[in-house]
Image (tube, helix red, strand yellow):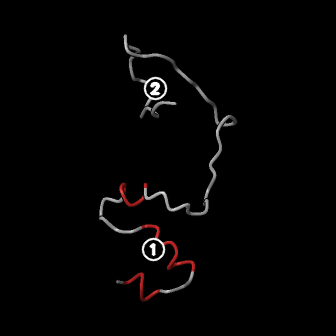
Amino acid sequence: MGIALPSPDVPVIKGTTGILAMGDTDTSANGYLPCIRCAFCVQACPMSLMPSTLSRASEAERWELLKE
């Protein structure tokens, strides 16, 4: 579908193929969704942590594993 732009001040250029403007009622904040182990969070983590492992450990209240 494309990428979200940081602000509406981005110019429309020759390579622009379409514009999709959505209001607050058109979008929704889903909140927490169950992990499907896609590993996108591992690639995105700037500290090279394993967010999926951290999430499971916190749900199981394994605080010693989180400290490691």
Please name the residue that numbered disc 1 is placed on: 54
Query: How would you rate the neighbour count of disc 1 (Cα within 10 Å): few for under 14, some for 14-19, many for 20 or more?
Result: some
Of residues 17 and 8, the one drawn nearer to the viewer in this rendering: 17
Cα–Cα span, label 2 and label 1: 36 Å
Q: Nearer the viewer, mark 2 or mark 1?
A: 1
Badge 2 element: loop
Point out the tag, 2 or 1, that comes first from the N-terminus. 2
Whole-percent x, y for residue 22 in the image: 61, 29
> Seen in the image, is 37 located left or right of residue 27?
left
Quadrant including the C terminus: bottom left
- Extreme right residue here? 25
Q: Please name the residue shown 52% across and 78% down the image.
A: 58
Please name the residue that numbered disc 2 is placed on: 8
> Seen in the image, is 19 located left or right of residue 26?
left
Indicate the amino acid at tag 1: Leu
Of residues 29 and 56, the one drawn nearer to the viewer in this rendering: 56
Q: Please name the residue shown 42% across and 34% down the image.
A: 6
Indicate the amino acid at tag 2: Pro
User: Vertically, is 67 above or below 15?
Assistant: below
Badge 1 element: helix
